[in-house]
Image: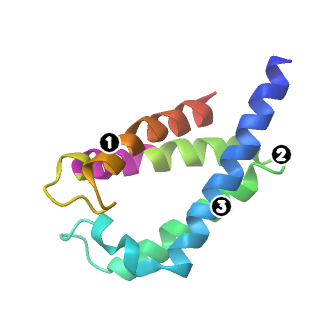
Amino acid sequence: MKEKIWLTLKLVLAIFIIYAGVQHFIDPDKLIPFVPSFLPYTDAIIYISGLVEILFGLALFFKNQAHRGTWGIFILMLIFLPIHVWDGFSETPAIGSHNAAMIRLPFQGLIIFISWG
C-alpha cells in the first residue's frame, strides 16, 4: 500500500513538473523576473530549465529512469529554492503577491520531499 502511494505521488509530481516545464516555452516572459539579473542569457536559462524539467518529469514514467528523474527534480528544486525564498521577501514578488510567494514555499518543500522519497 505504501509503495502505491509513493508511486501515485511520483506520477502526480511528473505531471506537475512536465506542465511547469512546458510553461517555460508557452510563456517565457512570465519567468524572466525569476532569473537573477546578474546571470547572462536569461532566455536560454528559461528554455533550458524548462527542457530539463520536462525530461526529469518524463523520466518518472520509465521504471529504469525514475531514479534519475527524482534525483534530478530534487536537485533542480534545491537550486530553485533560494530564488523562491528571495521572491517571498521581495518588495515586488515575481509570482505576483507575497501571499502567492509564501504559499509556494511549502509546495516547494513538498516537491523536494516527494522527490527525495
Give the residues in magenta: 78-86
Precedes in sequence: disc 2 or disc 1: 2
Left or right, 101 with respect to 47, comes to left
Residue 8 image offset from top left, x and y in percent: 79, 36
Name the disc covering residue 64, or none: 2
Residue shown at 51% from the left, 36% from the top: 112
Q: Nearer the viewer, mark 1 or mark 3?
A: 1
Q: Which residue is mark 1?
A: 102
The amino acid type found where label 3 is placed reads Ile
Residue 73 vertical position relative to residue 95 in the rendered view, above or below: above
The amino acid type found where label 2 is placed reads Asn
Gap between marks 2 and 3, in whole Å? 18 Å
Residue 61 image offset from top left, x and y in percent: 81, 51
Q: Nearer the viewer, residue 26 or 46?
A: 26
Q: Nearer the viewer, residue 95 or 78?
A: 95
Q: Circle 2: is it few (<14), some (14-19), or many (20+) Cα within 10 Å?
A: few
Q: Is residue 90 visible?
A: yes
The amino acid type found where label 1 is placed reads Met
Q: Quadrant of residue 29?
A: bottom left
Left or right, 116 with respect to 36, comes to right
Residue 37 vertical position relative to residue 112 in the rendered view, above or below: below
Q: Is residue 51 visible?
A: no
Kind of element beneath mark 1: helix
Residue shown at 36% from the left, 50% from the top: 100
Precedes in sequence: disc 1 or disc 3: 3
Q: Nearer the viewer, residue 53 or 27?
A: 27
- Evaluate if marks 2 and 3 touch, with contact meaning CB atoms under 8 Å apart: no
Gap between marks 1 and 3, in whole Å? 23 Å
